[in-house]
Image: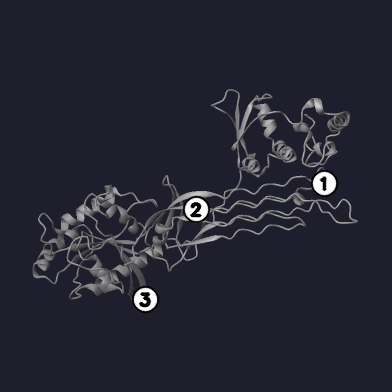
């Protein structure tokens, strides 16, 4: 027998980006071939896709780890590495994606709706893409970024129009079985139904779906019984139907008390998707009236229920009494709900434009280190991950990028002094103001940077180049020129 699983935790790991290649074209009779290192391929994404043929999260229960493939490294002769393949994970319609802290990431409703659960890392640029007027033959390439890893909670909230509420053995499964083609398990003992049942019902030109909440008892909203696990399946419903067992022999039970007990549970349950159940229309179904005593009880309680403004239907799943009237009434309420609800596309695109004054990073004082600073921002932290710190020229290129972004200027304004500790991402270093960007290639060979060498090793040629760069800040290009403040 297939198991129904409606809540799982998955560990999504996207593919890493491939490293770029540092290569110089070498061919007989062709001097100064120039850099020809290709770019690394991007890592594959882990993507959640809604599939109407999937009805449970069972596959993720047994295989919670999902990993996409990594991108390939670039090669010489301008050969880019292959991209990693995306991993497609098919989920049921109505799956809600949350963080482990309970924050909603996405509500996946509608066939084909997609969500990138974990984004693949970018491939690193090869030295052919890094060449510029200042660095005509870079001796380094950028590393590929690691893929994103996320632990996500998947919760299935059934997409049903009508939600059936009732005590165990009230006849909810029998009602779905006679109104639709669904075949739920039916037996004469409590808690027969351990999973939500979903049926499709046709009433004239209206087609709607019906779901039940198994094991709903007093205290369910606080975790008692099975109700807390399955109350989520009626969060999307257009109408709530109380199925009342008029033939119960349990002491202390009567239709009015059953309705009040379940309404109390609804009022104490807070739907994760927001809102509440107070504004949902209700109907009351007095079930099992084919039994004489049950019919007598239904006649007694019907006036009191109608006095509350609730439509009442007396039905029997055995004799099929009252089922047609009930079906068309539910269809009418569902149709009115659909017409009143604004039409919404299954896939929503949210645009979050960058603020005009957004510099792309922030600098704060490090509370754990006196005189230290922490630089936060997507771009500088990404550049740290892309840098090969075993290559001095790559480190110099990183310094140039941070300088152009304005990180050094911000550090100076906040009172940073040479030698103070600065943290960017996973990198912790002693900050030293850099010399004008772009002069390294005029002073040293590929793979090195004079700014990272000791001052007593700087020769006359390097001092001359440094002095010239300070006099003519724009000589080495707009990207690498020094400002007048330097």
Total count of labels: 3
| Circle 2 residues within 10 Å: few <14, some 14–19, many ≥20 | many
Secondary structure of the residue carrying numbered label 3: loop
Instruction: Give how far across and how far down residue 67 sits, in percent.
Output: 52, 55
Q: In this view, does 12 lie to the left or right of 322?
A: right
Q: Which of marks 3 and 2 is nearer the N terminus?
A: 2
Q: How crowded is mark 3: few (under 14 residues within 10 Å), some or many (20 or more)?
A: few
Q: Residue 144 carries which label?
A: none
Looking at the rendered image, the quarter that the N terminus falls into is bottom left
Residue where numbered disc 2 is placed: 12
Q: Nearer the viewer, residue 180 or 326?
A: 180
Identify the residue at horizontal 33%, vertical 74% (top origin).
Answer: 202
- Expressed as whole percent of the image width and height from the top left, the position of residue 177 reads 26, 72
Question: Residue tagged by mark 1?
Answer: 136
Q: Earlier in the sequence, mark 3 or mark 1?
A: 1
Answer whether residue 278 is visible to the viewer in this image.
no
Q: Which of marks 1 and 2 is nearer the N terminus?
A: 2
Q: Mark 3 points at which residue?
A: 205
Q: Which of 93 and 311 is in front in this view?
A: 93
State the residue at coordinates (75%, 40%): 393
Alpha carbons under labels 1 and 2: distance apart? 40 Å
Label 3 – label 2 distance at C-alpha: 43 Å
Residue 222, horizontal then vertical, whole percent: 27, 47
- In the image, 136 versus 318, the foreground residue is 136
Residue name at image x 85 percent, y 56 percent? 27
Residue 149 located left or right of residue 248:
right
| Quadrant of the drawing holding the C terminus | top right
């Amino acid at each position: 027998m297939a198991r129904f699983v409606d809540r799982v935790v998955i560990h999504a790991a996207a593919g890493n980006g491939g490293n770029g290649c540092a290569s110089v074209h070498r061919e007989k009779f062709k001097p100064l071939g120039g850099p020809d290192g290709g770019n690394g391929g991007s890592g594959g994404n882990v993507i959640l896709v809604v599939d109407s043929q999937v009805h449970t999260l069972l596959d993720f229960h047994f295989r919670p780890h999902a990993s996409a493939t990594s991108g390939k490294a670039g090669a010489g002769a301008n050969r880019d590495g292959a991209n990693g393949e995306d991993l497609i994970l098919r989920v049921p319609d109505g799956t809600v994606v949350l963080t482990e802290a309970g924050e909603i990431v996405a509500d996946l409703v509608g066939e084909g709706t997609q969500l990138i659960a974990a984004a693949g890392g970018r491939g690193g640029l090869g030295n052919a893409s890094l060449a510029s007027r200042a660095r005509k033959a870079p001796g380094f390439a950028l590393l590929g970024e690691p893929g994103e890893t996320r632990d996500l909670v998947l919760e299935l909230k059934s997409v049903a129009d009508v939600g059936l509420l009732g005590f165990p053995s009230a006849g909810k499964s029998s009602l779905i079985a006679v109104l639709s083609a669904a075949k739920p398990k039916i037996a004469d003992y409590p808690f027969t139904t351990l999973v939500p049942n979903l049926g499709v019902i046709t009433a004239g030109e209206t087609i709607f779906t019906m779901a039940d909440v198994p094991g709903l008892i007093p205290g369910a909203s606080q975790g008692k019984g099975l109700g807390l696990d399955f109350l989520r399946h009626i969060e999307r419903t257009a109408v709530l139907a109380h199925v009342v067992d008029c033939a119960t022999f349990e002491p202390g039970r009567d239709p009015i008390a059953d309705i009040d007990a379940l309404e109390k549970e609804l009022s104490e349950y807070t739907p994760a998707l927001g809102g509440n159940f107070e504004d949902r229309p209700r109907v009351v179904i007095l079930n099992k009236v084919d039994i004489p005593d049950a019919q007598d009880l239904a006649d007694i309680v019907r006036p009191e229920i109608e006095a509350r403004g609730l439509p009442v239907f007396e039905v029997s799943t055995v004799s099929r009494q009252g089922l047609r009237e009930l079906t068309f009434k539910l269809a009418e309420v569902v149709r009115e709900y659909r017409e009143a609800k604004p039409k919404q596309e299954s896939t929503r695109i949210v645009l979050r434009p960058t603020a005009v004054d957004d510099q792309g990073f922030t600098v704060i004082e490090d509370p754990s280190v006196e005189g230290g600073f922490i630089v936060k921002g997507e771009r500088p932290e990404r550049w740290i991950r892309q840098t090969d710190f075993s290559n001095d020229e790559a480190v110099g290129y990183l310094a140039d990028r941070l300088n152009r972004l304005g990180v050094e200027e911000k550090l100076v304004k906040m009172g940073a002094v040479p030698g103070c500790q600065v943290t960017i991402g996973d990198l912790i270093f002693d900050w030293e103001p850099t010399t004008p960007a772009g002069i390294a290639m005029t002073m040293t060979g590929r793979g090195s940077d004079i700014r990272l060498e000791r001052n007593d090793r700087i020769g006359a040629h390097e001092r001359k180049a440094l002095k010239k760069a300070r006099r003519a800040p724009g000589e080495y290009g707009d990207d690498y020129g020094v400002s007048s403040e330097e």
